[in-house]
């Protein structure tokens, strides 16, 4: 008997093709979230400067500027400064990086570049090689690495040192090279 | 035993039908960089695509999730369907500093509807309801258009969803 009652009710409901619903509405407030990261950029503060040096007519040499600062002369290369000490103005290349606080980033750049020169007497001088370009990041406290992390202000500093090789008998000239780096979020 | 049978046969005791919609999860576009403008699309199924953006590590992108619940008000073991209307009332946007984010279109996994355009009603038939309570969880994706003039921003854009029951079939 009870089963019969259930059956009747079910059939009645099923016989209503469009049982009028109340037209009630309900709403919910969802949310869309996104984090748009500020661009990262590097601004040059100092050039990589090897200073003034002399070359031997018979022995090749090199001057190395460390990323942490300081210069080291080998072979026929020596500083052309009063007293023979390190010349003022010798510095590694320095860049200030700014971007999103706390983000890690990667420094990309060449391992070696070529300096072109202009002879004191005029005309082009033979190119000189600059290699052993090393990267120092403040965020890694002295470690030589190419992956850094921006601090809570979104900043970091990069220093790049390198070695300039001076062949024997290199004529007096001014040399210049372009060192391009790229910083990208990692 | 007889009392139970009488209660079922008395329509006057039926409660008024009611509906609720809850927002279970936000639509997450994740973290990315764009130079001046770009778009990122998160589909209702979780597929992520982008244009003129660089995705970065951070929270994983994913669609929003909503749950629609219809209380028929009658205890009856019958099959029925619901004709509902879903509306996103307007364009969702936010300006934060030098960043403007706009969601101009949404997509969903609700049956028979792929796109939800702001201000346009989408009608959907939900089949397979069997008991007094009929509940459906659905996901909503979208395309976020970002225009950037400076800096970055954390965007939190409200997405109102309105669901109306048009008919019980």
Image (tube, coloured by chain):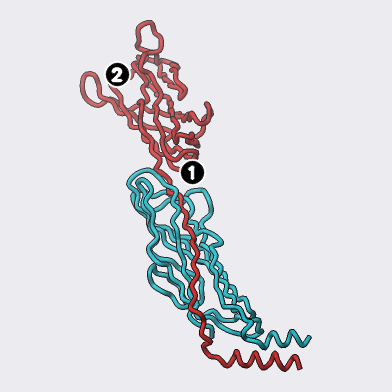
Chain colours: A red, B cyan
Q: Nearer the viewer, mark 1 or mark 2?
A: 1
Q: In the image, what residue occupies the spot 74% across and 84% down?
A: B4
Outermost residue toward the right in this view: B1
Which quarter of the figure is the N terminus of chain B placed in?
bottom right
* Vertical comparison of B98 with B19: above or below: above
Question: Is disc 2 on the same chain as disc 1?
Answer: yes
Q: Which mark is residue A178?
A: none
Around disc 1, counting alpha carbons within 10 Å, would you say few (fewer than 14), some (14 to 19), or many (20 or more)?
some
Outermost residue toward the front in this view: B12
Horizontally, is A164 left or right of A126 in the view? right
Confirm whether residue B52 shows in the render: no
Location of mark 2 (residue): A171
Q: Which mark is residue A186?
A: 1
Q: Secondary structure at mark 1?
A: loop
Q: Please report, as a chain letter, where disc 2 is located.
A: A
Q: In the image, what residue occupies the spot 75% across and 91% down?
A: A2
Q: CA distance from mark 1 to mark 2?
A: 44 Å
* Vertical comparison of A69 with A43: above or below: above
User: How many numbered discs, if any?
Assistant: 2
Give how far across and how far down residue B70 sits, in percent: 57, 75
Earlier along the polypeptide chain: callout 1 or callout 2? Answer: 2
Q: In the image, what residue occupies the spot 44% across and 40% down?
A: A100
* Vertical comparison of A22 with A107: above or below: below
Which quarter of the figure is the C terminus of chain B placed in?
bottom right
Confirm whether residue A135 shows in the render: yes
Give how far across and how far down residue A102 sits, in percent: 50, 38
Horizontally, is B50 left or right of B12 in the view? left
The one of A22 and B13 positioned closer to us in this rendering = B13
Q: In the image, what residue occupies the spot 43% across and 21% down?
A: A65
The one of B160 and B127 positioned closer to us in this rendering = B160
């Amino acid at each position: 008997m009870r089963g019969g009652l259930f059956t009747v009710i079910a059939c009645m409901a099923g016989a209503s093709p469009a049982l009028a619903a109340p037209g009630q509405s309900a709403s919910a407030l969802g949310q869309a979230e996104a984090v748009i990261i500020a661009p990262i950029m590097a601004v040059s503060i100092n050039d990589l400067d090897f200073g003034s040096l002399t070359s031997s007519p018979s022995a090749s040499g090199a001057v190395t500027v460390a990323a942490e600062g300081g210069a080291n002369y080998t072979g026929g290369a020596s500083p052309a400064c009063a007293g023979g000490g390190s010349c003022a103005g010798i510095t590694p290349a320095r860049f200030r990086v700014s971007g999103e606080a706390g983000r890690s980033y990667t420094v990309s750049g060449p391992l070696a570049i070529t300096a072109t020169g202009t002879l004191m007497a005029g005309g082009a001088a033979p190119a000189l090689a600059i290699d052993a370009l090393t990267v120092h990041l403040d965020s890694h406290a002295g470690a030589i690495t190419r992956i850094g992390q921006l601090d809570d202000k979104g900043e970091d500093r990069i220093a790049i040192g390198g070695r300039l090789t001076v062949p024997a008998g290199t004529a007096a000239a001014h040399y210049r090279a372009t060192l391009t780096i790229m910083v990208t979020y990692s | 035993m007889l009392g139970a049978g009488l209660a079922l046969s008395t329509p006057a005791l039926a409660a008024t039908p009611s509906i609720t919609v809850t927002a279970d999860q936000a639509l997450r576009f994740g973290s990315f960089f764009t130079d001046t403008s770009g778009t990122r699309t998160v589909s209702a199924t979780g597929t992520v695509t982008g244009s003129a953006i660089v995705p970065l590590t951070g929270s994983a992108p994913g669609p929003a999730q909503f749950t629609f619940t219809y209380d028929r008000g009658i205890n009856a073991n019958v099959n029925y369907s619901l004709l509902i209307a879903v509306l996103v009332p307007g364009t969702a946007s936010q300006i934060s500093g030098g960043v403007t984010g706009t969601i101009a279109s949404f997509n969903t996994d609700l049956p028979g509807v792929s796109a939800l355009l702001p201000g346009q009603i989408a009608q959907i038939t939900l089949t397979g309801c069997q008991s007094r309570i009929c509940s459906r969880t659905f996901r909503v994706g979208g395309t976020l258009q970002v225009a950037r003039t400076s800096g970055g921003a954390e965007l939190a854009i409200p997405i109102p969803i309105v669901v109306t029951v048009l008919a019980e079939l």
